[in-house]
Image (cartoon, rainbow, N blue to C red):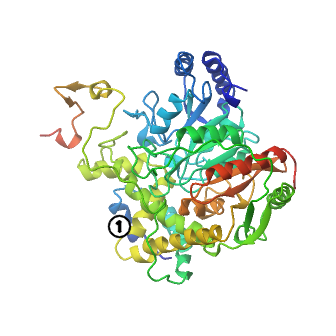
């Protein structure tokens, strides 16, 4: 086993992902299966200073650094369940209920 | 079904009714997540009212449900996005509609396009149109199944590591992945941003080419699109004289399924009969394509899917602790399915301190070597490459769901081209025990026109229904 439960839970915390106790065993097994499999890349001799790979051609076009509104198909108010004074109205968060 | 194919003007209203009837008939495939006759009729009326019919006038086209639309929800087959409706249309949707195409339906997929069988959908698996006990491939299995079942002549899917070519091969239809940068990703829900490509299914090479030509070209809303003219629909080649086709030995292992091997032999003979030259070549680092892909894609996915936190999109679940971190974790833990959670964890692991160099950096190095192999082979006078699309025909549902690595290996022949950003396609070239087999053709960057022209020449002369085992 390359990865233990503690490590899986640590990674889950980093990823902001709740994991149920009933899933622990299966998750550890499958994470190990995957990580052991991808570790075969260690067999590839180090290529030294390899140029970073760009998926497309060398010169990727960049757009101007100019702010601009993204075109929306409908006005914001039409998409909101509730909208008032230029704001979306959303349900109160549970943690705020006591305040 | 002839609506909108071969460039003929047809009634949008009639096509809407016919397409609706076919969608109803094929509902048991579970290939569709959203459609309504009302929206289809509106699409038909819009097309009928167009004063100058576009090149796709009256063609019904289905969209994978990770391509955003204003009129219908976009769920990515995930509970976390259930009911989400985008405030804007993807560029590819706007271009299809401007060309006269009718958006017919949003199709089922593996959740967030992560999978090779369309079994990892929160809304149930898609069934293979020829054998419901089998999978249609994935992750764009719904789109592939709809084209194969004759519901639409073309559909859009998305590729991150073969998610259109592999289901095209399983379902016996044409599947084309363009060069990275050829088609705008604006409005395609991000999975692996350095790999994602909107891609096309067609009943024929011509249908796929017409759709790809329509959606290709630079887009100011996607800075990774390349400043080149849109792809043209290629003129049919009478033969393959003057073309040299490479067969990379790493893609023809001894244990290749018998029917797949026979179909590829038949395709090779046909290329020679059409005047093409065959040459053996080698792409040694392709052996490492699957492990490289399954480091890079989950790493990019872990970053891209961080936005689904219960605050900005979709479902929200407040955790037991009632604080914001608990909200994030509970929403994500309950909203994402098993495969997506697994990939987020693997992606986070390979990017975490202590493992970044060993996994992620190494994978980036190998990715460069894989791409370099392709460059070297194309620079040596090879015009196109020919490989099997998949090692076997469509497998049984449930056959690979317990072993993630076995599922990943279904993409063994397709993910290297995604890593290298190359255009590639699957063409149906025969049947093995009644199941379709696809041959894959690969071209250098932006070589789509030659790729499609050569495929058309083969399509004319190879019977895709012929048993080849």
The quarter of the rendered structure image containing the C terminus of chain A is top left
Could you say which is closer to the camera, residue B11 or residue B467? B11
Residue B25 found in image quarter: top right
Residue visible at 37% across and 65% down in the picture: A11
Q: Position of residue B421 (x, y in %)?
A: 54, 59
Residue visible at 50% across and 81% down in the picture: A47
Q: Position of residue B287 (x, y in %)?
A: 63, 72
Could you say which is closer to the camera, residue B94 or residue B260? B94
Dot 1, how many residues are within 10 Å of its Cα: few (below 14), some (14-19), or many (20+)? few
Left or right: residue A66 compared with residue A63: left
Residue B401 found in image quarter: bottom right
Is residue B130 placed above or below B163 in the rendered structure? above
Question: Which residue extends farthest left?
Answer: A99
Q: Is residue A67 visible?
A: yes
Q: Where is residue B41 in the image (x, y as percent from the top left)?
A: 56, 17
Left or right: residue A61 compared with residue B338: left
- Write down the residue under mark 1: A10
Q: Mark 1 lies on which chain?
A: A
Q: Can residue B137 be seen in this view?
A: no
């Amino acid at each position: 086993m390359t990865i233990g439960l503690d490590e899986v839970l640590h990674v889950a915390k980093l990823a902001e992902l709740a994991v149920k106790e009933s899933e622990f065993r299966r998750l550890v097994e499958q994470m190990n299966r995957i990580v052991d499999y991808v570790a075969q890349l260690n067999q590839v001799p180090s290529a030294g200073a390899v140029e970073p790979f760009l998926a497309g051609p060398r010169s990727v076009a960049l757009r101007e650094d100019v702010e601009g509104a993204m075109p929306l198909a409908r006005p914001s108010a039409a998409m909101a369940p509730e909208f008032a004074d230029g704001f979306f109205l959303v349900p109160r968060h549970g943690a705020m209920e006591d305040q | 079904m002839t609506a909108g194919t071969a460039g003929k003007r047809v009634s949008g209203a009639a096509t809407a009714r016919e397409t609706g009837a076919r969608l109803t008939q094929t509902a048991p495939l579970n290939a569709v997540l959203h459609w309504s006759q009302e929206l289809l009729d509106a699409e038909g009326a819009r097309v009928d009212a167009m004063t100058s019919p576009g090149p796709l006038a009256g063609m019904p086209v289905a969209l994978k449900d990770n391509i955003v639309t204003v009129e219908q929800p976009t769920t990515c087959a995930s509970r976390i996005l259930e009911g989400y409706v985008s405030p804007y249309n993807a560029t590819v949707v706007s271009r299809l509609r401007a060309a006269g195409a009718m958006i017919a339906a949003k199709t089922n997929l593996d959740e967030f396009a992560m999978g090779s069988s369309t079994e990892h959908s929160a809304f149930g698996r898609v069934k293979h149109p020829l054998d419901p006990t089998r999978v249609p491939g994935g992750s764009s299995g719904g789109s592939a199944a709809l084209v194969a079942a004759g519901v639409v002549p073309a559909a859009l899917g998305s590729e991150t590591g073969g998610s259109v070519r592999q289901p095209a091969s399983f379902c016996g239809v044409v599947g084309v992945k363009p060069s990275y940068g050829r088609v705008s990703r604006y409005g395609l829900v991000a999975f692996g941003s350095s790999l994602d490509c909107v891609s096309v299914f067609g009943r024929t090479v011509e249908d796929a080419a017409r759709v790809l030509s329509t959606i290709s070209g630079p887009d100011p809303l996607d800075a990774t699109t390349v400043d080149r003219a849109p792809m043209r629909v290629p003129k049919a080649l009478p033969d393959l004289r003057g073309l040299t086709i490479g067969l990379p030995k790493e893609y023809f292992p001894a244990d290749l399924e018998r029917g797949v091997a026979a179909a590829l032999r038949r395709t090779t003979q046909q290329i020679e009969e059409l005047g093409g030259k065959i040459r053996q070549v080698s792409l040694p680092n392709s052996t490492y394509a699957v492990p490289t892909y399954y480091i890079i894609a989950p790493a990019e996915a872990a970053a891209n899917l961080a936005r689904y936190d219960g605050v900005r999109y979709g479902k929200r679940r407040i955790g037991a602790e009632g604080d914001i971190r608990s909200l994030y974790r509970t929403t994500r833990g309950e909203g994402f399915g098993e495969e997506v959670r697994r990939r987020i964890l693997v992606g986070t692991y390979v990017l975490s301190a202590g493992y970044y160099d060993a996994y992620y950096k190494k994978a980036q190095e190998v990715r460069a070597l894989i791409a370099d192999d392709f460059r070297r082979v194309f620079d040596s006078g090879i015009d196109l490459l020919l490989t099997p699309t998949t090692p076997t025909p469509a497998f049984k549902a449930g056959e690979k769901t317990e072993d993630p690595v076995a599922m990943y290996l279904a993409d063994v022949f397709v993910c290297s081209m995604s890593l290298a950003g190359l255009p590639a396609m699957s063409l149906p070239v025969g049947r093995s025990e009644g199941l379709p087999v696809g041959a894959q053709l690969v071209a250098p960057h932006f070589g789509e026109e030659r790729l499609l022209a050569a495929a058309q020449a083969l399509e004319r002369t190879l019977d895709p229904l012929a048993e080849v085992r």
